[in-house]
Image: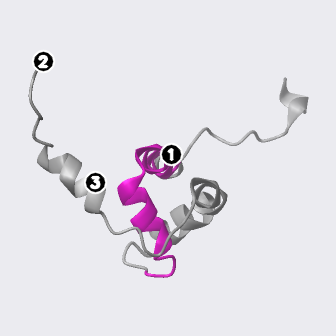
Amino acid sequence: MTGPRRLPDQGVHDLILDTEPWLSCEDCFALMDVYVETVLADPHSRAMPEMPVHLAGCPACAEEAQSLLDLVTAGGPEPDSGDESTA
């Protein structure tokens, strides 16, 4: 049997991370599109202070926010012209 192990520095950081203002994952996902639009319009905006706090402590939500941000900044697929007469 081994003795107690030392908690890595990242583990300590994660345990003492400030979570105020608090936001649930459900609320975070509901606000995600508005947050990404806000960040794109003004990267230094403090309009939604709960979002960066939550994203710093929640890898799942942070990954979703980054994916949405990447998708929006990549431009996405070309819009369909809707003109089917040329087909």
Residues tagged 1 and 2 counted as in contact (Cβ below 8 A): no
The quadrant the N terminus occupies is: top left
Which label was assigned to residue 77?
A: none
**Is 16 displayed left or right of 21 in the figure?**
left
What's the distance in space between the residues labelled 3 and 1, CA to CA? 19 Å
Earlier in the chain: of badge 1 and badge 2, it is 2
> Residue 65: within the magenta?
yes
Residue 36 appears at what percent x and percent y?
52, 62
Numbered-mark total: 3
The residue at 77%/41% (across/down) is 81
CA distance for labels 2 and 3: 27 Å
Which residue is more in the foreground, 57 or 3? Answer: 3
Q: Which callout, 3 or 1, points at the residue further toward the start of the chain?
A: 3
Question: In the picture, residue 84 is in which quadrant?
Answer: top right
Q: CA distance from mark 1 to mark 2?
A: 40 Å
- Report whether 16 appears left or right of 67: left
Q: Residue at x 39, y 72 (%)?
A: 43
Residue to which mark 2 is pinned: 1
Residue hosting label 1: 64
The percent coordinates of residue 28 (x first, y second) are 58, 59
In-front residue for pair 3/15: 3
Q: Which residue sits furthest front?
A: 1
Helix, strand or loop for disc 2: loop
Examine the rendered structure and indicate whether residue 27 appears above or below residue 75. below
Q: Which residue is mark 3?
A: 14
Type of residue at label 1?
Glu
Point out the stretch of residues depicted in magenta.
Answer: 46-71
